[in-house]
Image: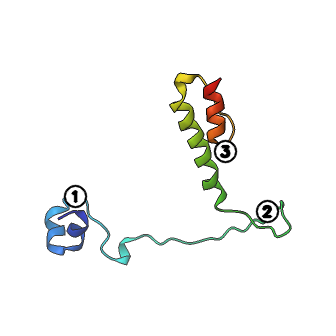
Amino acid sequence: MGLPRTWTSTAEKCRNSGPFARPTSRTDVAHLELIHLHSPSPLNPFGVKGVGEGSAIAPPVAIANAVCDALRGFRVELNATPVKAEKIFSLVSN
């Protein structure tokens, strides 16, 4: 049966949820006010800022770190991306 089923069934909710009550109506949720803060970027003529770049930075570094960990026995160090097979082969061969 599972927790979502317990939450949706009124009879089971009263019997199985114990001291953990979930909000049952819109009046149980506090009022939130949404505020937009606009601060144009001085780095480009349109004043726009990027949103998705942060998630594109970490994966190549994490992959390079994983390769370094895998090659620890060879005492090699990778400190540049992209990590290419030729680079790994040259490091291991030396």
- Residue 82 tag number: 3
Q: Quadrant where the C terminus lies?
A: top right
Q: Nearer the viewer, mark 3 or mark 2?
A: 3
Amino acid type assigned to the residue bearing label 2 in the image = Ser
* Residue placed furthest toward the right: 45
Residue 7: x and y in percent read 24, 69
Alpha-carbon span between mark 3 and mark 2: 29 Å
Q: Which residue is mark 2?
A: 41
Residue sitting at x 64%, y 61%: 52
Return the disc, 1 or 3, that comes first in the chain's sequence. Answer: 1
Return the disc, 3 or 2, that comes first in the chain's sequence. Answer: 2
Residue sitting at x 84%, y 63%: 44
Alpha-carbon span between mark 1 and mark 3: 52 Å
Alpha-carbon span between mark 1 and mark 2: 48 Å
The secondary element bearing badge 2 is classed as loop
Q: Quadrant where the N terminus lies?
A: bottom left
Q: Nearer the viewer, residue 52 or 12?
A: 52
Q: Residues within 10 Å of mark 1 (few under 14, many from 20)?
A: few
**Residue 43 sits above or below residue 89 on the image:** below
Q: Hey, which quadrant is residue 50 in on the image?
A: bottom right
Q: Which residue is mark 1?
A: 19
Q: Nearer the viewer, residue 84 or 44?
A: 84
Residue sitting at x 61%, y 40%: 85
Q: Hey, which quadrant is residue 41 in on the image?
A: bottom right
Compared across the picture, whether 33 is left or right of 12 comes to: right
Residue 27: x and y in percent read 37, 76
